[in-house]
Amino acid sequence: MDNLAMWLVSVNSPDEDVQRRGKLLIIIALGLMVLALALFPVTLATVYTTMGLVWLAGAAIAFAGVVLLGRFGQVNLGAYILIGTTLLVISGSLPTSNNQPNGLFFMILPVLCAGVLLPPVHVWGVLALAIVGSGIGFGLLPPEARDSMLWRQSMLSAPLLLSVVALITFLSARTTRHALGAAEVARAEAEAASAALATSNSSLEARVEERTAALRQAADQQRAVATQLQASLEAQQELNRVIAELAVPIIPISVGTLVVPVVGNIDSKRAALLLSTLLERVEERGARTVVLDITGVAVVDTQVAAALLRVASAARLMGAETLLVGIRPEVAQALVHLGVDLTTLRTAATLQDGLLAIGVTRSEHERAAAPERMVA
């Protein structure tokens, strides 16, 4: 049922005002058509049966045509046909009103229909048609009715009443039309604002996506850089380890004997590295003799001498004897001049002399230990 009603009042037009007036036209035409059909039994009971039935049948057909025109969007044409048919029916019914002028006041209906179905200015045209229709209906009256005082007074007051109704209808229709126009403008502005907002949102989303992609790319680049830096740091640490090993080379030349050739300047950092590395190797190899070769040391001062003494003392605590070799004449003079006491260290002029000294000492020690073993 609802679908049928929606189909009946559907108007084929893109204009919303035409659609609104078309729906009203269809509803009014359907109502008048039903009213005309409902009056058929009433007309059969009057003395004007034939003429009344003809009028009602023609009106019903006209109203059905108005419904079709409304559905096709021909609202103005359909409205004028509806109003004209209504005027004809009212005018034609005046002679059948038992000489009573009540039918004149039904002329208000076409004026009211014009206010809701046509543009406001058309109300005045319909008013003129209503006055003309009243005159035609008056002319169809019998002579004795036209001469009656009641009809003459009604014919004088009816146009005045119709004019007042037309004025009120015109003002109401004009106000309604302006309000609908303002609403349409507001709706159009709202749609434009909504479209602009949608465009802005789309643009904003695009910018956000671009920014997100840029940030993601930057983050990927930073991770790549961080990975490279980590790899570089690990490589640098490995290089530092190699450099540290090369800075303090420790050479095992026999079981229990380590040779440490020291080259270059010895500062506090390198002295600490020398001490820690040497003690680790002494522990690892169980060394009993450490040969410190300072042939390659450019300058030996108090600080360097103190570092060498610390190394010898630490090695002694771990059970290893320290032999200092490679003391050049100028280094010996500098140490004497500085008053450095190296009497706690065994010394030799060259590495070869030091190694020979270690070999002689061991031979003597073995010869001294042999009689004891024989006695035992």
Image (cartoon, helix red, strand yellow):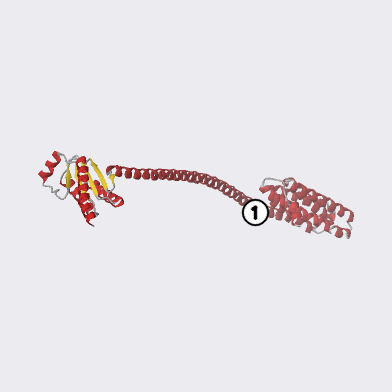
Amino acid type of the residue tagged 1 in the rendering: Ser
Residue located beneath label 1 in the image = 172
The N terminus appears in which quarter of the rendering? bottom right
Q: 175 and 170: which one is in front?
A: 175
Picture residue at 15% right of the left edge, 41% below the top: 331
Is residue 282 at all visible to an observer of this figure?
yes
Which residue sits at x=40%, y=45%?
A: 226
Residue 246 in which image quadrant: top left
Mark 1: few, some, or many residues within 10 Å (few <14, many ≥20)?
A: some
Image quadrant in which you'd find residue 164: bottom right
Q: In front: 156, or 96?
A: 96
Residue 109 picture location, percent across and down: 74, 55
Q: Residue at the location (80% across, 56% down)?
A: 34
- Residue 304 point in image, percent of width and height: 18, 46
| Up-down relation of residue 34 to residue 239 (above or below) | below
Q: Answer above or below: position of 102 versus 182.
A: below
Is 102 displayed left or right of 255 in the figure?
A: right
Does residue 119 show up? no
**Front residue (pair 217, 38):** 217
The foreground one among 45 and 35 is 35
Q: Position of residue 335 (x, y in %)?
A: 13, 44
- Mark 1 secondary-structure assignment: helix
- Where is 77 relative to 27, above or below? above
Q: Quadrant of the C terminus?
A: bottom left
The spot of residue 290 in percent (x, y) is 24, 47
The number of discs equals 1
